[in-house]
Each structure stands twice: as structure tokens, then as C-alpha cells.
Amino acid sequence: MPSRPLRLAALVELASLVVLLVNLATVHVPEVASLAGPVHGCAYLVVVGATLRDSADGRARLLAVVPGAGGLLAIRRITGRSASEVGTPG
């Protein structure tokens, strides 16, 4: 069962990536990038570390290193739930 930090970090990682891409595609405010970039990087590292801690499944560990959606994919692999159920607490 994936831990709460893994679930939270996976959602933060995806949300921060969306913020970075929207900022890049629209107004490109450097302050947004300088805030969201480190948040995204830290969330990515937490996802990888938490997946290594929570699962011995090699495929889940490989999925965790995919930037952006890797955390959600790893959670899906660990729990065996559908993608629409991954973000909901359960």
C-alpha cells in the first residue's frame, strides 16, 4: 500500500509540472518558474524515494522515475487500481 507522502508528492509533482508548462506556454514569468521548479524537483525526489521505500516491485520503481506522471503511475502499479481512482484517498 502506498504511503500518504507518496500520494501527496505525486500530486504535487504533477501539479507543479502543469504550472511550469502553462507558465512557459503563456506569460513566462521568471518568478513562477523559480518557485515551481524547485517544488517540482523536490516532489520528484520524494516520489522516487517513497516508491523505493514502499514497493519492491521493479516496474513500480521504474515508473516512479518518469517525470510528471511517474508517481501516479507507480501508485497505480502498487495498488492495482485504475488511473481515475489513484488521486482519491482510500
Image: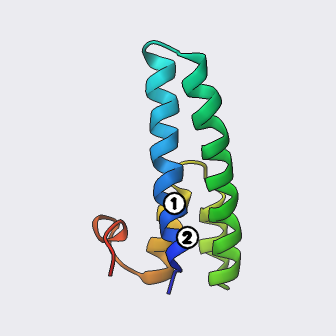
Q: Is residue 14 above or below residue 34?
A: below
**In the depicted structure, whether residue 57 falls above or below residue 17:** below
Q: Nearer the viewer, residue 82 or 86?
A: 86
Crowdedness of circle 2 by 10 Å Cα count: few (<14), some, many (20+)? many
Task: Find residue 6 and name its label.
Answer: 2
Where residue 17 appears, x then y in whole percent?
52, 40
Q: Position of residue 51 (x, y in %)?
A: 63, 73
Q: Quadrant of residue 58?
A: bottom right
Q: Secondary structure at mark 1?
A: helix
Residue assigned mark 1: 10
Q: Is residue 13 above or below residue 3?
A: above
C-alpha separation, residue under disc 2 versus residue under disc 1: 6 Å
- Picture coordinates of residue 24, whole percent (x, y): 51, 20
Instruction: Indicate the amino acid at tag 2.
Output: Leu
SS state under label 2:
helix
Q: Residue at point 55% right, 58% down?
A: 70
State yes or no: discs 2 and 1 in contact (Cβ < 8 Å): yes
Q: Nearer the viewer, residue 19 or 70?
A: 19
